[in-house]
Image (cartoon, rainbow, N blue to C red):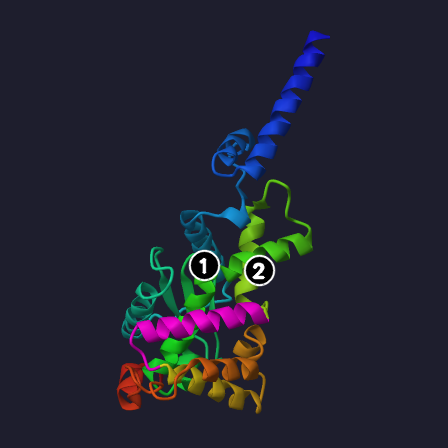
Amino acid sequence: MVKRRKRYLIAIIVTLIITLSYQLPSYGNRWFEILIQGVQILQITQLSDADEVKLGEKINQQLLESGEVKLNRDREINGYLDKMGQRLAQSSDRPNIPYTFLVVNDDSVNAFATMGGFVYIHTGLMVKADNEAELASVVAHEIGHIVGRHALKQMRQQAIAQGVMTATGLDENEAIQIGVEVGLRLPRSREAEKEADQLGLANLKSAGYAPIAMITFMEKLLKLSESGTLTILSTHPATSERIVKLREAIDPVTANQGDGLNSKEYRRQIQSLL
């Protein structure tokens, strides 16, 4: 009888700890991690910046190891993108996490971001841009997704839809796989795209780039899509609506004021891709 009562008591204590780990992740989750002894369970809705960066690193590792993302190793091109990206990152609304900007060796016109500051830009997109400001507008938009934590929100939705989200959170391996899908294939919501545009435009301006570039590049994408499907438009929907909203948000008097409109200089910077 005494042993049975002890078992009941232990069961109750474990249940309470699990409940606390879900409701009070700031300290309850540590108790739960001790109990499960190494099994990685993530509280996606309340992930810290440090944990988000770690998850982004693991998603990046999976993307590279799977062969779905092949990086361009040109030091000058990567240095050029990183310099631009860091300029934008520091003027964004979330400058306190490390950002990693990666050139993907792919002729398709595409760009995407995962969580934790990882931004991927295809060489095909870099070639299609007419100037640095247009490229910067894409990078700023992707940073906007990171600032808005859109990938994390979408990951949570997918985990619930797939039935892999539990009361305690999401298994890390499941999170990595879903993170890959979110980054590469799943379309963003209209709300997420609108917010990323707003955040990206504000970022573009604060970094000193000409805001008109965000509109000119989107118009170019829309025109290209008429002759075939663009990957970037499959994951970044409602381009026509977004252009209208951006035109409303940009003052035509100052639209062309700022850096990055020199096409000749831009071509010189990406010469190895041409």
Q: Examine the rendered structure and indicate whether residue 11 appears above or below residue 204.
A: above
The residue most toward the top is 2
What are the residue bounds of the magenta stretch? 190-210
* Residue 234 x, y percent position in the rendering: 58, 76
* Residue 139 falls inside the magenta stretch: no
* Residue 138 x, y percent position in the rendering: 42, 76
Between 201 and 252, the one nearer to me in the picture? 252
Q: CA distance from mark 2 to mark 1?
A: 17 Å
In the image, 24: left or right of 257? right
Residue 8 in which image quadrant: top right
Residue 57 in which image quadrant: bottom left
* Residue 88 x, y percent position in the rendering: 33, 69
- Image mark for residue 60: 1
Q: Amino acid at mark 2?
A: Gln
Q: Residue at x 37, y 71 (%)?
A: 203
Q: Which residue is mark 2?
A: 154
Between 207 and 233, the one nearer to me in the picture? 207
**Majority secondary structure of the magenta segment?**
helix
Q: Residue at x 59, y 67 (%)?
A: 186
Q: Quadrant of the N terminus?
A: top right
Front disc: 2 or 1: 2
Q: Amino acid at mark 1?
A: Asn
> N-terminal of the two: label 2 or label 1?
1
Q: Residue at x 34, y 65 (%)?
A: 89
* Residue 133 x, y percent position in the rendering: 34, 81
Residue 98 in which image quadrant: bottom left
